[in-house]
Image (cartoon, coloured by chain):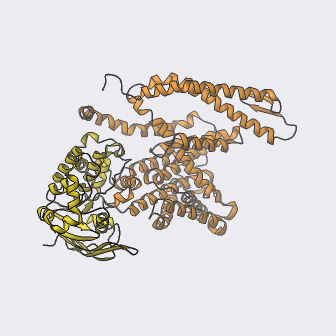
Chain colours: A yellow, B orange
Amino acid sequence: MAAALHLDGLCKSFGKTEIIRGVDLSIAKGERHAIIGPNGAGKSTLFNLITGRFPQTSGTISLHGDDLVGKAPHEINRMGLSRSFQITNIFSNMTVFENVRCSLLWSMGYKYSFWNLLDRSHKLTEGAEEILEQINLTERRNLPAGVLSYAEQRALEIGITIAGGADVIMLDEPTAGMSHSETDYIVDLIRKVTENKTLIMVEHDMGVVFGLADYISVLVYGEIIATGRPEEVRANPKVQEAYLGEVLEAEH
Amino acid sequence: MSDISKTSAAPARAGLLSMKYMPWIIAAILLMILPFIFTNNSSITIMSQMWITVIFALAYNMLLGQGGMLSFGHAVYMGLGGFFCMHIMNYVEDFGLALPLPLLPLFGGLFGMGFAMIIGSFSTSGAGTRFAMISLGVGELIAACSIIVVAFFGGEEGISGDRTYGLPFFGVEFLKQIEVYYLISFWLMVSAVLMYLFSRTPVGRMANAVRDNPERAQFLGYSSRWVRFYSFCASGFFCGIAGGLFAISYEILTEENLNAVQSGTILLVTFLGGVGFFFGPIIGAIAFTLLQTVLSLQTELWAFYAGALFVATVMFFPGGLAGLLMMHVPAARFGKLKTLGVPYLKTLLPGAIGILGLCCLVEMTFHYRHAATGDNEMTLFWTTFDSHSVTPWLLVIAVTAVAFFIMRKTAPELKEAWADANSPPKGGA
């Protein structure tokens, strides 16, 4: 069976600066995979390469065996890959409900139609309400998304990301800037909504990473120095040296 | 909060249904009876112009408000639709083509849409400065073409025609302005309803999403570019309809109908009305047409006041007139709108007097500088006086100053009343 996501010799340079220097990574279907690493290691760039936000310099990316090279973000999304952003990225002038409903449109086959009236579609309304229920924002339904609290906006962003029914979900620092209780709330939410899906996340909070991930890859200076089960990665001397040592020390 | 919304969900739905159709029904009735209230010919002409501007402004707002695209050359689509219709009208006259006049705007719309498809194919790849600059460039280009391509645009004198040669439509030949008024009103209703429904379709909603955050929209499976393109074409269509109606109403089109001035005007109209709400441009178009027609009869300086109003709107009420109205919704919901009446009167009445005083000063200055030598008499607010003597100046300055002073004094009271009206009733929540 083809891996959900497969990277082969992926490189990206901006001018002379090499940000991603030959990443090989294979993520199986249904796996929860975390990518960790120090600041500036290229984690977000890696995300942007996979989702088609930037073109890669060399190497290949394939989703379920299909090549993603040269595809625009919206085309990649239609193939079943969805992502969230490090900086909250929602439709802030639209209501919470509209945010979720818009994220359902493509997957429900509405495309660019101008002959369907959205309010008429019960399927769409119910689908959106189900998602709202899942992310606990039913009560905030009719508020403009911009006025939600930070944690709620992040939850909404996750809701938008999963709503389209993509089976590969990529989350970029879903708990960044959150308090402990908010983090717990988001982690539960992520676990709940990504059941039976492939999850790839970038995260700095080691508690979240070790609690959520089946596999961990450590990215340092554009290269993956280790991939494996959480306990293996934790024990790996190279990782200790390059990154985890400091982080774990800092946390204790 | 949640309890309220849950328990009242069922009855609210029935209420919503009638709420949904009510504004449209009221609008249709108003359109029908207005000519019986304002019966003279000039008011009917003004109203005709108003409704054409409403269609144009609504179409423009499909881009600006709904899609977040700032166009500086949108008069092109209305103008071209109008020119095209004028040519058809002449064709009907010359060759006896069997085309009833009421259908003519449809062709204007299709032509506007066709042209929007060509321009949109390359201008809609971005929404920001790039789109604005292309729209400006295309606007200038077409305006320049109007002098060069004389066969289509008729050069400096434009092209004219006669609407009455078409097939009589159920016996109506559109000789009278009132018949044209109803034709325009009909198209206004049709266009407004269609544009409203467009905002409720998937592509219309995605236009909002792309406006708010084009990148996120991409990761929902939509190409921002195509979403913009569809909005652009739809907008071009309704602009073309407005152009066709213009051709029918005025029977002449010139370069003035598609130049940058016209494009600027519609931006002004739309912004004045408020881009954030569907009905905003309607208010804007009505207010602006009134300024343009009624005020211009009173003073040569009407454009100055319109400009001042526009600047004030942008600075103090970015939501436009519609935003100003909608600001009162929370207070109305709390049932406290009445408490605002007296404070409003206390502050806004002196404010209005002050502003009128300022206007008087502007008019007097204008008269003092520009009236023919020896013509010292001027009339303002039904009072005739000598603009070169000191007394009226002192009087107006005093009144203005006192009015503004009172307004300043009562403003805190209004602020307080406003804050009070916008807080939920005590014990209620």
Q: Position of residue B386 (x, y in %)?
A: 82, 30
Q: Does residue B44 show up?
A: no
Question: In the image, is residue A7 above or below residue A246?
Answer: below
Looking at the image, which is closer to me, A194 or B117? A194
* Picture quadrant where residue B424 is located: top left
The front one of B347 and B27 is: B347
For the N terminus of chain B, give its image quadrant: top left
As drawn, is B195 to the left or to the right of B5? right
Q: Position of residue A241 (x, y in %)?
A: 21, 66
- Residue at 40% x, 36% y: name it: B22
Considering only vertical position in the picture, is B115 above or below A138?
A: below
**Going 29% across and 55% down the picture, which residue do you hit?**
A103
Give me the residue at 48% from left, 52% from top. B64
**Residue B57 placement, left or right of B396:** left
Residue A222 lies, in percent from the top left, at: 29, 70
* Position in image of residue B188 (x %, y %): 49, 47
